[in-house]
Image (cartoon, rainbow, N blue to C red):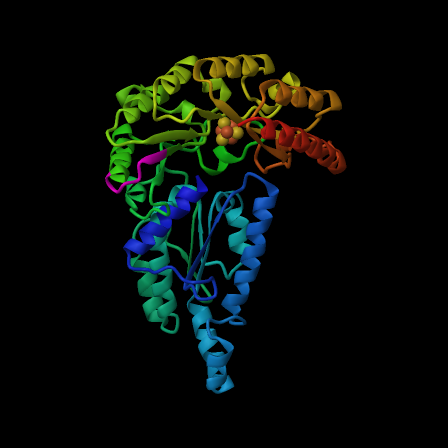
Amino acid sequence: MNDRDSEALLGLFLQKGYIQAKSEKDAEVILVNTCSVRDHAENRALSLLGTYKKFKQGTEGRWTKDEGQKMKSSNVRAKRSSIASRKVIGLIGCMAKNKGDEIFSKMPYIDLICGPSAFFKIPEYVERIKRSKRSERSPERLKEVLSEAEGRPKGVEGDKGLRIKDLEDRDRDESFYDSVYRKEPDHAQVVISTGCSNFCAYCIVPHTRGRLRPRNPDKIIAEIKENIKQDRRKITLLGQNVNDYHFKSQVINFVELLRKIDKIEGLEELDFVTSHPKNTCQELFKVMAESDKIKKHLHLPFQSGSNRILKLMRRGYSREEYIELTNQYKQITGGTLGTDIIIGFPSETEEDFNQTKSLVEEVGFKYAFIFKYSPRLKTKAAEMVDDVLEKVKSRRHKKLLDLQKEISASIK
Ligand code: SF4
């Protein structure tokens, strides 16, 4: 989802006449699109921001050493500092939504903070910030920029121009998906819904991306047709839980949407991520089996093989139901499976872990993304004691990785 968001956002900037810089040092605008699902991703984003701070301070410029030597050193310093002061640095996406207030006050060199719902407004915000930087030396002009800004938020006046923070949870404007830029020549990712209303105990997504918001099926189909026209005939549908897709005014669910998309002329290949076991049904498997375009592969996260842990995780299915579902899937489609697993959820015992291990052996996944649990702010699980020792998490993690490696090697 983040990849597609970044791609669409880049498209909006290109449509406005921006060009892609060769490196961050050269860039006038740097936006860090972030994920909050795990600690590691947030720490990486913070470390990147630390690097970009140096650009702002003018300790890094876009001048090469040779170019610099041609100028008198005082001029070089002045030039660098002028470029540095024009740079716009933004933190956007889930981490912005999650920790934006704190970061906005602690890191004054960050000009823009936007949650996932505000992505369609980012180019406008960047323009406003850039205008305020150009008028930095004229308080009169800065006042004008601040007052001419339309819509919320108005922004605050920083030492170096305007700073904007938009963490509002709202429907994304469809114009965001009109962005025509695509990285791949033959494949397109198409968002069918944003957010999630499941509130699994460990997951930050409903808190950062908001409740499930399905896109209008007509808009989804139009976007797919447009991509096919551009010769991108392989389509991946994206949603945090695609199976929960339902568009009320047209009484259409995910299976019906798939049927409609499957009939689009010129489509060659179709797949989708991510599926939730509690919303996955035989009807879906039948559509997959009947189609010669839908890939016979299902990413179906099970997270834990222990019923006790599944209950604490609020996943809404049991180990037995999950295994039954995968048996039906294999029987009807003959396809392969992938999954996500969390190791070391609060109170996970050796017996709980063994249940997870035996589920992996029983189902036989083509691949598995295996993560060590880390508490996420605002989630239900963060209220529990993170009591599985790091060394125990690491041992179980390695054991499961080794097992999955063997299984993956045996599945074509
Ligand atoms: S279904 Fe997926 S995205 Fe939604 S809360 Fe659960 S883990 Fe998070």
Q: Quadrant of residue 247?
A: top left
Whether residue 212 is visible to the viewer of this picture, yes or no, is no
Of all residues, the one furthest to the bottom in this rendering is 72
From the viewer's side, name the closer residue of 130 and 61: 61
Quick one: quadrant of the N terminus?
top left
Q: Residue at x 59, y 27 (%)?
A: 410
Q: Indicate the position of residue 289 as horizontal and vertical percent values.
A: 39, 18
Q: Indicate the position of residue 216 as horizontal and vertical percent values.
A: 29, 30
Total number of numbered labels?
0
Left or right, 263 with reference to 357 = left
User: In this rendering, is residue 85 above or below 331?
Assistant: below
Q: Indicate the position of residue 333 as horizontal and vertical percent values.
A: 44, 17
Q: Residue at x 57, y 46 (%)?
A: 42
User: In this rendering, is residue 204 above or below 78?
Assistant: above
From the viewer's side, name the closer residue of 235 and 134: 235
Whether residue 297 is visible to the viewer of this picture, yes or no, is yes
User: Is residue 388 in the magenta section?
Assistant: no
User: In this rendering, is residue 66 above or below 194?
Assistant: below
Q: Residue at x 57, y 35 (%)?
A: 378
> What segment is highlighted magenta in the picture?
229-235
Q: Quadrant of residue 402?
A: top right
Q: Indicate the position of residue 87 as horizontal and vertical percent values.
A: 43, 65
User: In this rendering, is residue 305 above or below 191?
Assistant: above
Left or right, 224 with reference to 374 = left
